[in-house]
């Protein structure tokens, strides 16, 4: 299985890191077999699985459940679980208890926390007691009500410098890796060069040490227009929609199930023969 030291070594030797979100065993198994390095059980499930407008309603119990599901489909990838809103911000004690539950009750070997310098102490406390932490700066979906909208970060020099300082603080506090979300390519490149730990970009250009996509974006599973940074590798939404329509039509017309999908009761003579066997 892929370990955190192996992920960190990839940066040192110049190998790119691949990360995808997963929320259940079947997709986890597919991505794991494909060779994805890290499976992130993201609180993005609030949006793409539960149908909420944002990630805020996701609970710790739900994250534990989905991480357990992902673990059943994973043999090789490093599993990282998101900590949901208000599961770690209240106090260091709360953060220890809840991140500890993730590591004790699921196959995750690390947690991911959104936040900047305000989390420095929490990250230091967690990592000092052996809880690996992946940081997350730039656009922070859990702060959507403060931000007002999802927008690029680090567009000005002062913003870029502030992000770099935050990244260095989180590295010093013990983060083993850092997600940079919706950060300008130039800012992400500067941060990546300044850090010894790997950066994982999402909407942060090509210069990060790795990349992450939400599986629903990558597979084209959503009907709405895709995000600028999300590449659709195959567009499954219209394919699944068409399959469902064909199913409904065949059920209504009586075409499904056909003889091929039907099992019949055996005859009395066949029953006697079976009993003799």
Image (spheres, rainbow, N blue to C red):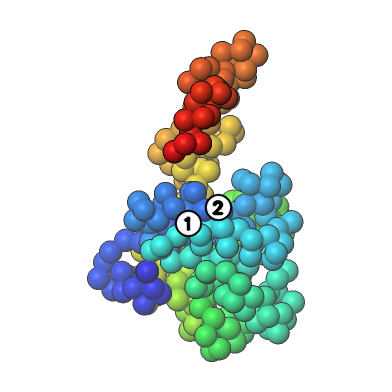
Residue 65 location (% of width, % of height):
64, 61
- 245 relative to 9, above or below: above
Residue in front for this viewpoint, 88 or 50: 50
Farthest-out residue, bottom: 128
Residue 184 location (% of width, % of height):
46, 56
Residue in front for this viewpoint, 184 or 45: 45
- Number of residue marks: 2
Whether residues under marks 2 and 1 lie with C-beta atoms below 8 angstroms apart, the answer is: yes
Bin the neighbour count of mark 2 within 10 Å (Cα to Cα): few under 14, some 14-19, many 20 and up. Answer: some
At mark 1, the secondary structure is loop
Residue at 68% in and 60% down: 62
Residue 30 location (% of width, % of height):
42, 49
Residue at 60% in and 58% down: 66
The N terminus appears in which quarter of the rendering? bottom left
Q: Which label number is shown at residue 270?
A: none
Indicate the quadrant where residue 17 lies. Answer: bottom left
Q: Is residue 6 among what the camera can see? A: yes
**Left or right, 148 with reference to 162:** right
Residue in front for this viewpoint, 245 or 191: 245
Residue at 47% in and 36% down: 276
At mark 2, the secondary structure is loop
Q: Which label number is shown at residue 73?
A: 1
**Left or right, 177 with reference to 118:** left
Q: Is residue 210 among what the camera can see? A: no
Residue where numbered disc 2 is placed: 24
Residue at 44% in and 38% down: 277
Bin the neighbour count of mark 1 within 10 Å (Cα to Cα): few under 14, some 14-19, many 20 and up. Answer: many
- 218 relative to 266, above or below: below
Residue 170 location (% of width, % of height):
52, 78
Between the residue at mark 2 and the residue at mark 1, the CA separation in whole angstroms equals: 8 Å
Farthest-out residue, left: 13
The earlier-in-sequence mark between 2 and 1 is 2
């Amino acid at each position: 299985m892929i370990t955190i030291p192996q992920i960190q070594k990839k940066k040192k030797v110049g190998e790119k890191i691949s990360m995808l979100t997963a929320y259940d065993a079947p997709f986890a198994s597919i991505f794991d077999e494909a060779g994805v390095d890290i499976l992130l059980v993201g609180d993005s499930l609030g949006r793409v699985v539960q149908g909420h407008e944002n990630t805020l309603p996701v609970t710790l119990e739900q994250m534990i459940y989905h991480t357990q599901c992902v673990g059943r489909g994973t043999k090789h990838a490093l599993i990282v679980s998101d900590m949901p809103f208000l599961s770690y911000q209240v106090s260091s004690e709360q953060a220890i208890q809840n991140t500890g539950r993730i590591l004790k009750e699921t196959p995750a070997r690390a947690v991911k926390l959104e936040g900047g310098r305000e989390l420095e102490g929490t990250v230091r406390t967690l990592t000092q007691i052996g809880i690996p932490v992946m940081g997350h700066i730039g656009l922070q979906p859990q702060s959507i009500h403060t931000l007002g909208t999802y927008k690029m970060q680090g567009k000005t020099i002062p913003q870029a410098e502030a992000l770099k300082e935050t990244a260095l603080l989180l590295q010093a506090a013990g983060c083993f890796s850092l997600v940079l979300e919706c950060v300008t390519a130039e800012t992400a490149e500067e941060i990546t060069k300044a850090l010894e730990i790997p950066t994982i970009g999402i909407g942060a250009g090509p210069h990060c040490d790795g990349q992450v996509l939400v599986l629903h974006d990558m597979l084209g599973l959503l009907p709405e227009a895709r995000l600028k940074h999300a590449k659709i590798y195959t567009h499954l939404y219209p394919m699944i929609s068409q399959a469902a329509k064909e199913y409904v039509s065949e059920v209504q017309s009586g075409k499904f199930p056909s003889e091929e999908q039907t099992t019949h009761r055996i005859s009395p003579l066949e029953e006697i023969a079976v009993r003799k066997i």
